[in-house]
Every structure is written in C-alpha cells, then in structure tokens.
Image (cartoon, rainbow, N blue to C red):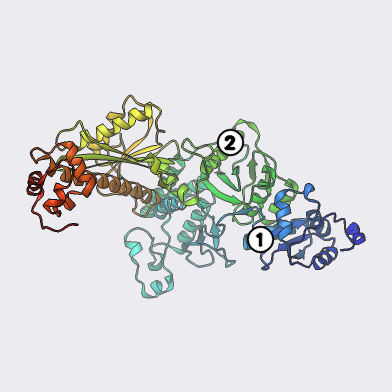
C-alpha cells in the first residue's frame, strides 16, 4: 500500500502473512463503512479467526493494524494470520453486540472469548401449544410455541429436579395422547402414579392446564406463588366436597414446601437476581451463576470459558454476560457482579431488548450481596483448581469436575475430592497377606504415591487387623510429612474394614480425612455415622470414579501378592535342601534365574556353579524336582 493511502486510513503498521495479497486486504479495509456492525477476520482456509463488533466499522478494524508495541502479543499473532475480512453492517451498536454473540457461538473463533461446549446443555421443553402439554428434554430451542427452561449445565441436578417434580406435577410423557383418547385407554404411567390420566378424563382439561402452568412457574422460580395458588385451589376443592382432588393438591403443596425448606434464604434488595462470579487460570476461565428467586438460592449454573488469557476481568465479564444471557430463556431483574463489566450501558440496553422486564446489571452492594458474589467467585476458583485444598497445579477438566463434584455432593464433603486414596487387602488363607494403597489425582492414577505393604504383625487371616496395620503405617508417614494427606480415603471392604481403618487413623492427621467403604456391590457406599448405606446409579460419574480407583487398588494388591507367592515358591524349595546355604542359593538363582530353569538343568550344569560339586548338584535336583536332562 502507498504510504499516502496508509496515512489517510490511519494504519500505522500491517503484518500480512506469507503468501497473502496485502493490497486486497487494504482495499477492503479502505472500503469499510462508517456504520455499526460486526467484522470477521478469516485465515488461510477461510476459517473465522476472530469476530468483533464496532460502533464504527472503519475505525474499529483499523485499530487492529497498529505497530506491535501498541497492541498485545495475541493481537500481533492474530493479524499475522489474517487472510481475509468480512463485515455485516447493522442499525445500532446493540444489534452489533447481539450479532457478535451469535457469530461467536456459531464459529467458535480461537481469538475470541467463548463459552466451551455451549451447545450441549439440555433444556426442559413444555409443549405449551398443545391442548395437553407434555414435558421433554431437548438440546435446541425452536420457535414452536413451546416454553423452554434452562439450559441446565449440571445434569445430576437436573435429574434430581425432574425426579422430585414428576411426583408433584405428574404430566403426561406419551407422544400421541390423541390415540389414547380415541381408544379411551390409559398408559403405564397412569398406573404407577406418573400421570393423572387426562386422556381417560381422570383429570379435567382445566385442572391439567393449571398444573402445567404451576410447573412452569415452579421452574421459573415462582415457587412460593405456586404454593399460595395450590393452597387456594385445595380450599376450593374441599368447599366443593372434591376430597380426592383436594388430597392430590395437598400432596403437591407438601412436595414444594419440602423443596423450599432445603433452600437457603437470602435478604436481597429485590426478590430475584443472578449472582455471577468469575475465576481465571491461563487460557481458561470459569463462571458460576447463583440463581436467586423469591430470595432463595435455587440453583447454581457453571460455565467454562476459553480464550481469556489476554483479557482483563471487565472484558471477560462483558463477553460472558453477552454470550450467556442471549441464550437463556429467563433473565432476572438484577445481575450482581464483583466488578463492573466493559460497556455496561450497552449491555443493559441489549438485555432490555430480549427480556420482557427491565434488567439491571450492577456491582454488589451491602454485606449480603457482597458475600453472595464472593461465594460465586469462590466456587468458580474451586472448580478451576486454583483454591483447591488438594493439588491446584492445573484446572480440572469438565468430566473430572463432574465426577469430583458429584462425589462431594453425595458424600457431603466440605472440599472437592481431588486427591483420593484407596486401600485393599489381598491374601489366600492367611498366607502372604499384603495391602495396597493407590492414589488418584484429578481422576487419574498418580503412581508416585502408590504404596504396598507386606503385613507382618497379623498371624493368619484377619482382614480387619491387616487393614488396620496398612492404614496405621500410612498415617505415620503422613504425620512425618513424607506424603500429603488425601481429600478422601476409600476402603475396599465392608463396615468392619472401614471401622478398623478409622480406628488406625485416630490421633493422626488422617483423623480429619473423610473415610468411606465400598461393599462387594460397588454401588453400595458405607459412610461412618450413617445407619444405612448410600446407593448410587452404576452409571453416575461418582460411581465410575470409585470403580476406577477400586479396580486399580485391587490390581496393584493382586500383583504384589502374586509376586510374593512366586518368590516364596522359588525360594522355599531350595531352603529345604540340606547343606545348601544362602550364598550358594543366591549363586544358583543369579546364574539360572528361576527355580523352573534350575529344574531343567543337567547335573553337570548345576555342578559348574562355584561351591557346588556333583553330589550337591544331584541333591539339588532331587530337592527341586526330576531333571529332564535338557538345558534351558
């Protein structure tokens, strides 16, 4: 490009990649309009590298092409890869912000801040447009008249929610209710209490629609309002002497009240808000959204972000809030943050266009709001691994986090269990009893912290005492500072082994570590102080993690036990030969390698070992077994 044209465009420096026509790119930059819009930088294969929005396209795009000392290293790397440029002009900067979010989700450009796995989370769909609506799970929103709730990033929490609501709001699940109405035949769900049978007129159309409306309000967080309406409906049913209907409504009310009793109350200035906390670690960042409805913390949403390494917190927040709230179906009246995001006024304008009610985005005020924001940020930091009580040397991957989080939730642990140890005892009729200890860190074997124990103080077969010795020896090493304590200790065995392990840990640093036991049926988990065992689905992430750890401990123990048996069998036969001392036994094993190879040697080969003559060689072969006269 001619220097005069570059000066007129305000471009001080361009670093085009090799093989690129710089004149064509400069002509495109020169022809950009002065309108608001979105621009796309593209690479050699026409892939989208970066999506940006602009109040004025011409000025914003030129700002990327400055000297390297005026832009960051990430911008320099981006500009060196740019081969082409596209733009889309729109009417306002707000429209540009919305379009930017859409294009970032669609193309996932590597130089943008973006939500990870943005398309995989499920929504609850209620087919409101049908006469008798049904509930289903979907992963895409369609403009079909249905009502959508979500997305739900924690699938375990979603399963729990649906399990509870299915009994409170027994909606139909059949795909073709018209066929059931025509046949006047109910389905299995009706007989097991999962549907009220509107197809056979067991519930009126008006009552069914009212129940679906209450279900939608329940999902939207208006749970106390649902309770008040149900109580009024129950009183009306009693007044009409409709006692079966009144009893059904009473059960619905009690179910919702039991859920409300488990949810934390907070004293916010408004009844509903999303509380957002963000933590970052290198290229990754995690955002946690605490959803407060009717002054109760209903749920937690977790989102992972990428491409954050060159951005400050205010920029990360602006990008995240735009990407997140242009996808959710309900936006609360307030969004509370720790710091103010970039372009706050523009962000509020955009949210106002997609929400039926005004949305205020602001920093937390007062002790209660600040405490909630700190809680959200603390959760995000723990999920990233920055503040984990275990090793925080790298962020947890989403699947590792799902396993650890479910284990923490199901066991009631105070910390995320990133370092887990498992003990197993192996013996055959009390001979060569050994124990193994394996360590998993962030869901994977951490073999530098594997240990094996040859049980020495226990005569005969006593699994309880053997487990006690292994745990006590490990506790001594932890107390001496030779090894880090775990976040969770798993005992492969029943109540007896678990109690023996806990008693061995008493008075040591291990006393503060949670212990659990695994019964023969893997899904049965024993927790100290709990009268019944905990049963989890075999496909749950927590059970899969425990299965890997238990199997590895078993493999490690069996391997050590087998090695000891082999060694004992080899040495014991030589031990019983009169006149053969330890030095000559060692020479034999060093030369031939194993008892089996000694057994296959001729007398002459055995006699050639220093210190062993023909007569001793014959005695050795008689002691270890018959010779076949062939060399190995």
Residue 504 to residue 256: above or below: above
Which of 576 and 304 lies nearest the eye of the viewer?
576
Q: Position of residue 295 (x, y in %)?
A: 55, 40
The answer to whether residue 500 of the structure is visible from this angle is no
Residue 78 to residue 432: above or below: below
Q: Position of residue 426 (x, y in %)?
A: 22, 43
Mark 2 vs 1: CB contact within 8 A = no
In this picture, residue 13 sits left or right of residue 389: right
| Outermost residue toward the top in this view | 507
Q: Quadrant of the N terminus?
A: bottom right
The disc, 2 or 1, on the residue closer to the chain's N-terminal end is: 1
Q: Position of residue 423 (x, y in %)?
A: 30, 40
Badge 1 is on which residue?
Answer: 102
Which of 541 and 548 lies nearest the eye of the viewer?
548
Residue neighbourhood size for the residue with mark 2, other residues' Cα within 10 Å, grouped as few (<14), some (14–19), many (≥20): some
Q: Which mark is residue 281?
A: none
Q: Secondary structure at mark 1?
A: helix
Badge 2 is on which residue?
Answer: 374
| Outermost residue toward the right in this view | 4
């Amino acid at each position: 490009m001619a220097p005069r044209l570059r000066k007129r465009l305000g471009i001080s420096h361009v670093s085009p990649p090799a093989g690129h026509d710089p004149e064509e790119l400069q002509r495109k930059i020169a022809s950009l309009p002065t309108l608001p819009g979105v621009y796309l930088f593209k690479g050699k294969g026409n892939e989208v590298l970066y999506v940006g929005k602009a109040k004025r396209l011409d000025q914003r795009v030129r700002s990327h092409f400055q000297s390297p000392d005026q832009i960051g290293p990430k911008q320099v790397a981006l500009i060196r890869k740019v081969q082409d440029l596209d733009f889309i002009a729109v009417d306002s900067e707000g429209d540009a912000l919305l379009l930017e979010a859409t294009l970032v989700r669609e193309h996932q450009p590597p130089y943008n801040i973006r939500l990870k796995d943005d398309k995989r989370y499920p929504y609850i769909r209620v087919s409101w447009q049908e006469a008798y609506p049904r509930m289903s799970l979907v992963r895409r929103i369609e403009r079909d008249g249905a009502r959508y709730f979500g997305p739900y990033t924690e699938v375990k929490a979603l399963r729990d929610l649906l399990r509870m609501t299915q009994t409170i709001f027994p909606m139909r699940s059949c795909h073709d209710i018209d066929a059931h109405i025509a046949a006047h035949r109910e389905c299995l769900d009706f007989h097991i209490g999962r549907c009220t049978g509107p197809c056979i007129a067991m519930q009126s159309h008006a009552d069914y629609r009212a129940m679906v409306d209450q279900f939608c309000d329940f999902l939207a967080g208006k749970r106390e309002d649902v309770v008040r309406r149900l109580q009024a409906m129950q009183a009306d049913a009693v007044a009409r002497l409709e006692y079966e209907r009144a009893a059904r409504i009473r059960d619905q009310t009690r179910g919702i009240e039991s859920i409300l009793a488990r949810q934390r109350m907070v004293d916010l200035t408004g009844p509903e808000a999303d509380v957002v906390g963000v933590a970052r670690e290198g290229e990754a960042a995690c955002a946690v959204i605490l959803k407060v409805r009717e002054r109760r913390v209903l749920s937690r949403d977790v989102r992972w972000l990428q491409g954050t390494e060159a951005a400050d917190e205010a920029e990360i927040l602006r990008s995240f809030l735009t990407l997140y709230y242009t996808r959710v179906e309900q936006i609360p009246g307030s969004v509370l943050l720790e710091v103010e995001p970039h372009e706050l006024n523009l962000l509020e304008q955009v949210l106002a266009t997609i929400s039926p009610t005004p949305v205020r985005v602001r920093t937390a005020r007062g002790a209660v709001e600040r405490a909630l924001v700190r809680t959200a940020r603390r959760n995000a930091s723990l999920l990233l691994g920055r503040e984990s009580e275990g090793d925080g040397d790298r962020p947890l991957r989403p699947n590792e986090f799902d396993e650890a989080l479910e284990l923490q939730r199901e066991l009631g642990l105070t910390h995320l269990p990133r370092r887990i140890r498992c003990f197993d005892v192996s013996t055959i009729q009390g001979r060569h009893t050994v124990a193994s200890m394996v360590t998993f860190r962030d869901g994977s074997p951490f073999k530098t912290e594997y240990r094996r124990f040859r049980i020495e103080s226990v005569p005969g077969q006593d699994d309880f005492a053997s487990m006690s010795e292994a745990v006590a020896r490990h506790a001594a090493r932890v107390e001496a500072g030779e090894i880090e304590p775990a976040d969770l200790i798993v005992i492969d065995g029943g109540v007896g082994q678990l109690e023996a392990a806990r008693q061995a840990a008493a008075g040591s640093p291990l006393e503060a570590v949670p212990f659990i036991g695994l019964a023969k049926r893997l899904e049965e988990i024993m927790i100290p102080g709990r009268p019944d065992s905990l049963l989890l689905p075999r496909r749950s992430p927590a059970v899969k993690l425990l299965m890997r750890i238990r199997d590895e401990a078993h493999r490690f123990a069996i391997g050590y036990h087998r090695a000891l048996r082999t060694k004992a069998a080899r040495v014991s036969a030589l031990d019983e030969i009169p006149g053969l001392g330890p030095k000559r036994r060692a020479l034999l094993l060093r030369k031939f390698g194993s008892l089996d190879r000694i057994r296959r040697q001729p007398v002459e080969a055995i006699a050639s070992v220093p210190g062993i003559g023909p007569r001793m060689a014959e005695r050795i072969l008689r002691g270890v077994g018959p010779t076949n006269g062939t060399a190995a």
